[in-house]
Every structure is written in structure tokens, then in C-alpha cells.
Image (tube, rainbow, N blue to C red):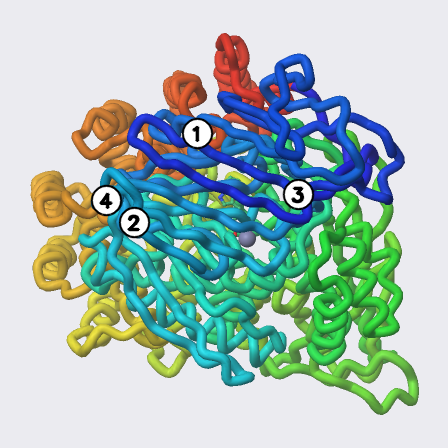
């Protein structure tokens, strides 16, 4: 497959002013009539070149230029390109193609999901519908007429406003949609199905009335309220925080079961994976409710950050994704607990993005090349990209950042631009020089900050030395130091923030400072420091970096209870737990377990005056995945055993506290989604999980009872998970069966039922995973089912996946090879755990590598999987 390079970017040779589409939808295929009003681009360097349009899996029926049919000598159909050598400067091109949505298992372009037609055009799916210059810097106005059987497809949707509808012969009907905003074709959408409509409305800040509509299958009609409320909150928030008002008269959301990602921000017609939009108290956990709110917000926010201002090319993907993730995380912070939201974001970043940044697929936030763009919808583009925007926010402060975003939206409205344009707007609005900061977009790899300090009691000075280093990544060595905002505080012996005085005669002595690192090494001096402080470093995780500092366990325990920064209190707890667990990896069974950890957790559990939302997070031990990420040549089985030992020790030592904690929290009231209520359920379920970890009989009774009595999925799932991970095999089998019987007709719940089993070493041995794949509810064509069984197994059931005999690796290779024929995007994502083979000792690494080679040697490998496998083996 060929590689596309950023350095080769050229403006398009042809522009499209208007697109007229007519879809004839049938059971055995669809005919697409496309009329493109085109002209040569005056900015193109090639003023006489041939017209080339992208295509993929299309059957070309006819081509006409300005009304004259072309014969096959006048154009060339190369499959992936339609070439017309001789075209005038401005013309109308009519192309008719035939496609087969019912056979489209890749879920790119137009396909069928549960009997309905739907589309996914980002990144390069529009070319699977018709021939088109499929690149985001070609923006056009679209008019779309959809024709289909009226009884099977009463609802026909596309972008914009519906301007005409009517009946046709043979029981068919049509609706025509017009989108007044020019857009790239990746934002085109079409839906046709037998769906129920849920309506609401929103009055914008300027008093315009917007029609809000959700379309779902009839069985899901009671699961729309949360998404609709989330949408209205998002619309209000974007007006208040970013001054962004919605621009069309209608905003539509559609839920589909078969979808490769979470959702898609098509103009005025967002399409969602059902699992990311449908929820009821009975069927969705607290986590799912929060996720839905965040994704609805994310897609809505794209209307400005992505649609009104879009990407010039796919190397600029983080322009819209990083910025929009930053915006949705600000929104979630404002809707719930900011500290908890930050903890969740950082956990994902440090566990998974850092791993990506240290692996063979590491790439900058603005990549320099790709083979298959779908492989670049990564944690680096999304999460690290959001951190980069967050650092700009930290450096500029909220007011200047808002000035910068206003300028960006105003300056580039209706344009396709670059990450550099974004940074430039921030510079121009603030007067700050961000030239060194731009390296965050260009250099891959996670910077490491090595920190040391010295306290001079006589002089009353405290010196903090910070050295930064950025590791080599594929194709990038000898990196330059980056511009890093580094927030810190210093704690005195009573746990109070000390005034941070940095120069003699300086009156300004704040309790917290954001230092700016620009050199390889800095030494910062603090004056009038009356005692040796305990440093609270990188508060709020002010930059996506690794920090090393020789904290003692005493200091960590101290920070856990005293740091005024809630995030760093949590982080100190994580560091203490990591230190304790790591010290037990490979240690004899009788090695002592740090008593400070038990004391710290007892304090957290038994003091109800503490922020319960933070406590609920602090009681989560670092995951196996995170411990593996932190280790060099990790021994997964030994890490698993050490973590289990610590959990067992904590549960035994804290048994009475756990029972008291469980009973103290009243969960009998009305189900609420407030941070306090969510924290209460989380704490109770953690207590239950720990009690069942040691097969406590009383815990078992509580769990069985909770499972039976629960009026919400969080508690039912909490009990189910605890029982599944316990040694109470009979209870486990019983509740699993009861759960399935109750929810077998709800695909989103069945996905949770699959996940709870495939993630558990107790039920997720390889044989059981195979059994789940043979289950009546498993479906190879549905990405959610594949992810909930195979993806969860390889990503979360790590002790089984990394079995010493390599069976987990070979199993994954077999599944990837099988899936590659039908859905290459999902197959390529499933490969991820194997790509990390170099991190592991040869006993594992060699077998992981062999599994990659097994995939590599498969005939007819897709470009998606080819890229991941070859780059991993390089
Ligand atoms: N912008 C959307 C990206 C997306 C996507 C990309 C590749 C393949 C399938 C896809 N479905 C959606 C999602 C978002 O970030 O909002
Ligand atoms: Zn997005």
C-alpha cells in the first residue's frame, strides 16, 4: 500500500460548488445519481490537468459531462479513480453508480444495520457511495433526494432542512434535503428506516427555535431522554462558554447498532452507535450515562470545531478531535466533579496513550504520514491532542484562551484549516509566542521530567531542578525540548500550601504557580522557605508527561491526605499503591505488605466528611494495564499475582470497614445521577468487590441480595461483576443465567454481559471466550459484540491473554485474520495488544511477534491491518 505524506499536500485541482444526489434505495442495492457542479481551482499549480475522482467498490453505470453522455474512451474507470482527461474550466458532471449496502460489512459508506440504511463517510467513506474528490478541503453545498419503499422506510433523512416530500409509484416515496452550509463530503449522511421519532426543542441565545429530533428503533423509544437532555445541556453550555450558537433549524440524532466507532458528527444529522446514546436506569450503568452525555456533547460541539471550521487534510485530524475532546471534557467537568473528570482523563491517557506513544505506532499529534487514515483515529490524536489544547488554555488563562477561540472561529468560519492556524489564532489573540510550543504537534513520544530538589535550611531556600527528555520514537530521534506548563505547590509540615516566593523583594507569593519549562534543564529557587517542604508536582496533571521524583512512602501518604489539589491527592495514592504492588512483583508470598497502604485506605473508607467522589476514585487500585505500562519487561503473571495479593490483604485487613462502608451508604432513594449519588454507588460496589475477592460469605449474601433488589444497572452490574470474579461458582452461574434471561433482547445489555465475562480470569479462560463467541447473541458483523468479547479479552483479561504458552496471542491472531475479510477497521484495532511485543521479555515478546507474523502472512491482507502489522514488526 502507498504512503501519503503531509509534505506532499497540494491544494485541490478542482473545486465542487454544488452536489446534487439522488438515491434509489432497494433491497438488493442502491443506485446513486450524482450531479457535481465543478470548476478548476484558480490556486492549483496544474491549470490543465485531468479530472480525478476517488472511488471504492463502485459499479459505474454512466458518466455525462454538461449533459452529454461520455463513452468509455472518454474516461477511465480505474476502480479507485475515475479519470476524465478532457474537461473545461467549469462544468457539470453526472455520474450514476450502483452499490450494494446489504453486502457492505466494512461499515464504510452506505450500509445496512438492523434493516435500516445508514452511512459512515469519515474519513474516506464517501468514495464508497459515488465518485468524488474525497478530501476535506473540497467543500460543497449538498442537496439530497432519497427514494425508497414507504412501508419499510417511512423515515428518510439527510443533512440540513427537508424541502420537499411526496409519494411515488409502487408504494415508494421520496424526501429531499438541502444543507445550506458548504461541507466536506465526510460530513454527508443519509438514514432510511422504520424508526420512531422523539421530538423536543431548544431556544437559542438569540431566540431561534431549534427542532431537536431523535430517531431510534421502536424497542428503544424509552431510552432517549438522557441523550436529549444531554444535547440541550451541551447547546446551552457551548453558547455560554464558547459563544457558539447552533446554526440550522433542525438537529437530528440517529441510533444504529452496527457502527465502527462511537458516533459521527455529520452536519445536522449525528449518527450514534446505539451503545453511546441509548440509556435507561434499568439498562445503563452510571458510567454509560456519563459516557453518553460526553459523546452527545462531543458530537454536538463538532458543529463548530470540525464542521464550521474543518480540517484541510487528514494530518490535521487533531485540529477538530483534540480541540473537541478538550471542549467535551470541560463540559463534563462543569456538569459533574472536575477532579473526578480529570482523574478519569489522566487514567486513560497514562494507561493507554502513553503506551501508544512508547510503541511502534507512535506518531505526533499532527502525523507526517499514513497508509490508512482510519488507523490514525488514535488516543494520541484525541487524548494527547486534547492535552495540548489544555496546555494552551493553562498558559494563556481562560480569558485569553476564549479570545483566541473567538478569533479562530471568526477568522476561519467556512474554511478547511491546519493545527498551525489554530495556534496562530491563539498567539494573535494573546500576544504570546507559541513557536516552541508547536513542537507538541510535531514530536511524538511522552516527555519525561526527572526532578530533584535541595533545601538549604540556613538560607531558607528550596531549589527544584527539572530536567526534560523526550524518548526516541519511530523515525524521530534527538528531539528538542518542549514548552511545558508545570503547576506546583509546596506543602509545609501541617499540610498547608506554603507561599511560593521566587525572587528577593517579590511581593507576589501565591500558593500555586505554573512554571514554564523550555530548556532541557531548569533550576527554580524558592525563597523564605521556613521548613523542608513536600513538593506537590504537576498539579492537575498540567502536562502529558511522566514525572520521576524520589518520593518516600511517608511523603505519598502525607500528600494523599493533605494536598490541596484533589488530583494530586489521588495521584499520591496511586503512586503509593504502584510502589507497594511493584515491590511485591516476584517477591515471596510471605513478604510484608506496606501497613501505610492499609492505614490510608481505612482512613478513606471510614471518614464520611471526605469528598466521597474523590474517595471512590482513590479506592480503585491501579489497573494491571497501568502497572504493565509502567514496568520494563513486565512479567504479567507476576504483576497479576502481586496486585491480587495486595487486594486480598486489603480486603482481609479492612473487612469490617468494608461492611460498615457498604451499610453506611444509603442507596434506597430515587436513582439520581449526581456526583454524590454516583460516588455512593461506586463506593458500595467497590466494597462488595473487595469482600467477594476474599470469598466472604456475608459479602456474598449482600451481593446476591443487591443483584435481586437493584432498581438500576449500576448496582445490578456491580453485584454481577463481584460474583463473577468470586470463587462462588454456583452463585456466579446462577446470576449470569438470570441476567441473560432478563436482558437477552437488549443488545446493549448483552454487550455488558459479554464484557463482564470476557474480562474476568474466573470466567474468561480461552475456552470460555470461545464459548462466548459460539453464543447465540455473538455476531461477527456487529463491532460492539466483537469488541465486548475479543477486544475486552485481549485488553483487560491480561493474565489469560499473556498465558505463558502463547495461546492468547495465537487466538487473537486467528480472530484478526478472520475479521480482516469483513471489517478491516475493527480488525486493525484488535491487533493493538500484539503491537507491544518489544516491551515484553522474549518468552512472551517472541510469541507475540510470531502471532503478528502469522497475521502478516495471511493472503489479501487489508491496508488497515497491513499498516499496523508491518510497522509493529519493523
Ligand atoms: N469524527 C468521528 C470519527 C469517526 C470515524 C472515523 C473512522 C471510522 C469510523 C468513524 N466513525 C466516526 C467521531 C468523533 O470523533 O466524533
Ligand atoms: Zn470527534
Q: Disc 3 versus disc 1: distance between alpha carbons?
A: 30 Å
User: Which labelled disc corresponds to residue 106?
Assistant: 1
- Identified at 41% across, 49% down, the residue is 592
Label 1 or label 2, whichever lies nearer to me, is 2
Q: Which residue in the structure is indicated by mark 2?
A: 167
Decide if ligand 1 comes within 8 Å of the CB at mark 2.
no
Q: CA distance from mark 2 to mark 4?
A: 34 Å
Side of 471 relative to 197 (left or right): right
Is residue 799 something one can see in this rendering? no
Mark 4 to mark 3 CA distance (whole Å): 43 Å
Question: In the rendered structure, are the residues bearing label 4 and label 3 in contact, judged by CB atoms less than 8 Å apart?
Answer: no
Q: Nearer the viewer, mark 2 or mark 4?
A: 2
**Which quadrant is the C terminus positioned in?**
top right
Q: Residue 655 in the image: x percent, y percent?
A: 24, 61
Residue bearing the label numbered 4: 747
Observer-side mark, 1 or 4, equals 1
Amino acid at each position: 500500500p502507498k504512503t501519503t505524506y503531509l509534505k506532499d499536500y497540494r491544494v485541490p485541482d478542482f473545486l465542487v460548488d454544488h452536489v446534487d444526489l439522488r438515491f434509489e434505495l432497494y433491497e438488493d442495492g442502491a443506485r446513486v445519481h450524482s450531479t457535481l457542479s465543478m470548476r478548476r481551482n484558480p490556486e492549483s499549480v496544474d491549470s490543465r490537468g485531468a479530472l480525478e475522482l476517488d472511488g471504492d467498490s463502485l459499479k459505474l453505470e454512466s458518466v455525462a459531462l454538461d449533459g452529454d453522455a461520455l463513452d468509455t474512451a472518454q474516461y477511465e474507470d480505474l476502480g479507485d479513480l475515475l479519470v476524465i482527461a478532457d474537461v473545461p474550466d467549469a462544468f457539470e458532471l453526472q455520474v450514476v453508480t450502483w452499490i450494494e449496502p446489504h453486502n457492505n460489512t466494512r461499515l464504510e459508506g452506505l450500509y445496512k444495520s438492523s434493516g435500516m440504511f445508514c452511512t459512515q463517510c469519515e474519513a474516506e467513506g464517501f468514495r464508497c457511495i459515488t465518485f468524488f474528490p474525497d478530501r476535506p478541503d473540497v467543500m460543497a453545498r449538498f442537496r439530497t433526494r432519497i427514494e425508497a419503499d414507504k412501508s419499510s422506510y417511512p423515515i428518510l433523512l439527510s443533512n440540513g432542512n427537508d424541502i420537499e416530500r411526496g409519494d411515488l409509484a409502487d408504494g415508494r416515496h421520496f424526501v429531499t434535503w438541502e444543507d445550506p452550509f458548504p461541507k466536506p463530503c465526510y460530513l454527508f449522511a443519509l438514514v432510511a428506516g422504520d424508526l420512531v421519532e422523539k421530538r423536543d426543542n431548544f431556544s437559542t441565545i438569540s431566540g431561534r427555535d431549534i427542532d431537536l429530533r431523535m430517531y431510534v428503533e421502536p424497542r428503544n423509544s424509552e431510552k432517549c431522554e438522557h441523550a436529549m437532555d444531554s444535547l440541550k445541556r451541551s447547546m446551552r453550555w457551548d453558547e455560554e462558554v464558547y459563544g457558539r450558537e447552533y446554526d440550522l433549524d433542525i438537529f437530528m440524532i440517529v441510533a444504529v447498532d452496527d457502527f465502527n466507532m462511537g458516533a459521527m458528527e455529520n452536519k445536522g444529522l449525528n449518527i450514534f452507535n446505539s451503545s453511546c446514546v441509548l440509556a435507561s436506569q434499568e439498562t445503563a450503568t452510571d458510567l454509560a450515562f456519563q459516557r453518553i452525555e460526553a459523546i452527545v456533547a462531543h458530537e454536538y460541539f463538532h458543529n463548530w470545531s470540525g464542521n464550521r471550521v474543518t480540517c484541510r487534510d487528514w494530518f490535521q485530524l487533531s485540529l477538530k478531535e483534540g480541540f473537541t475532546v478538550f471542549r467535551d471534557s470541560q463540559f463534563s467537568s462543569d456538569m459533574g466533579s472536575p477532579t473526578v473528570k480529570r482523574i478519569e482523563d489522566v487514567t486513560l491517557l497514562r494507561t493507554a496513550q502513553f503506551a501508544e506513544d512508547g510503541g511502534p505506532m507512535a506518531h505526533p499529534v499532527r502525523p507526517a504520514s499514513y497508509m490508512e487514515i482510519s488507523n490514525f483515529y488514535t488516543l494520541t490524536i484525541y487524548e494527547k491532542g486534547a492535552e495540548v489544547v489544555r496546555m494552551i488554555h493553562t498558559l494563556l488563562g481562560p480569558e485569553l484562551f476564549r479570545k483566541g477561540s473567538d478569533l479562530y472561529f471568526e477568522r476561519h468560519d467556512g474554511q478547511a484549516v491546519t493545527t498551525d492556524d489554530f495556534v496562530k489564532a491563539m498567539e494573535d489573540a494573546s500576544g504570546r509566542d507559541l513557536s516552541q510550543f508547536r513542537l507538541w504537534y510535531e514530536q511524538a513520544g511522552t516527555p519525561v521530567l526527572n526532578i530533584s530538589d535541595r533545601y538549604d535550611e540556613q538560607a531558607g531556600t528550596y531549589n527544584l531542578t527539572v530536567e526534560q527528555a523526550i524518548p526516541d520514537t519511530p523515525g524521530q530521534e534527538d528531539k528538542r525540548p518542549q514548552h511545558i506548563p508545570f503547576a506546583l505547590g509546596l506543602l509545609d509540615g501541617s499540610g498547608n500550601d506554603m507561599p511560593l516566593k521566587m525572587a528577593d523583594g517579590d511581593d507576589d507569593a501565591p500558593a500555586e504557580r505554573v512554571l514554564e519549562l523550555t530548556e532541557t534543564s531548569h533550576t527554580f529557587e524558592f525563597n523564605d522557605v521556613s521548613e523542608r517542604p513536600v513538593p506537590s508536582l504537576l498539579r492537575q496533571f498540567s502536562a502529558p508527561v511522566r514525572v520521576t521524583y524520589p518520593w518516600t512512602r511517608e511523603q505519598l501518604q502525607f500528600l494523599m491526605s493533605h494536598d490541596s489539589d484533589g488530583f494530586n491527592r489521588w495521584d499520591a495514592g496511586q503512586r503509593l499503591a504502584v510502589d507497594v504492588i511493584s515491590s511485591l512483583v516476584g517477591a515471596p508470598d510471605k513478604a510484608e505488605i506496606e501497613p501505610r497502604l492499609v492505614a490510608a485506605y481505612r482512613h478513606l473508607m471510614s471518614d464520611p466528611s471526605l469528598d466521597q467522589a474523590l474517595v471512590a476514585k482513590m479506592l480503585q487500585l491501579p489497573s494491571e494495564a497501568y502497572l504493565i505500562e509502567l514496568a520494563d519487561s513486565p512479567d504479567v503473571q507476576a504483576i497479576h499475582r502481586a496486585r491480587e495479593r495486595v487486594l486480598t490483604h486489603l480486603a482481609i485487613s479492612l473487612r469490617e470497614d468494608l461492611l460498615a462502608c457498604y451499610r453506611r451508604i444509603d442507596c434506597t432513594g430515587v436513582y439520581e445521577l449526581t456526583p454524590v449519588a454516583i460516588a455512593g454507588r461506586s463506593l458500595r460496589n467497590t466494597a462488595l468487590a473487595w469482600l467477594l475477592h476474599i470469598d466472604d460469605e456475608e459479602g456474598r449474601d449482600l451481593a446476591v441480595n443487591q443483584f435481586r433488589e437493584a432498581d438500576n444497572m449500576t448496582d445490578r452490574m456491580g453485584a454481577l461483576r463481584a460474583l463473577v470474579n468470586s470463587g462462588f461458582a454456583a452463585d456466579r452461574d446462577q446470576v449470569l443465567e438470570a441476567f441473560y434471561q432478563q436482558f437477552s433482547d437488549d443488545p446493549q445489555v448483552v454487550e455488558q454481559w459479554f464484557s463482564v465475562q470476557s474480562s474476568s480470569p474466573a470466567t474468561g479462560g480461552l475456552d470460555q471466550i470461545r464459548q462466548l463467541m459460539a453464543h447465540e447473541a455473538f455476531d461477527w458483523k456487529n463491532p460492539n459484540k466483537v469488541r465486548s468479547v475479543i477486544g475486552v479479552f485481549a485488553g483487560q483479561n491480561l493474565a489469560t491473554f499473556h498465558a505463558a504458552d502463547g495461546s492468547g496471542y495465537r487466538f487473537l491472531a486467528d480472530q484478526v485474520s478472520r475479521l480482516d475479510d469483513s471489517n478491516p477497521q475493527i480488525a486493525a484495532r484488535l491487533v493493538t495488544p500484539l503491537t507491544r511485543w518489544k516491551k515484553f521479555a522474549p518468552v512472551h515478546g517472541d510469541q507475540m511477534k510470531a502471532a503478528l507474523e502469522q497475521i502478516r502472512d495471511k493472503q489479501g491482507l487489508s491496508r488497515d491491518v497491513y499498516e499496523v502489522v508491518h510497522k509493529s514488526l519493523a
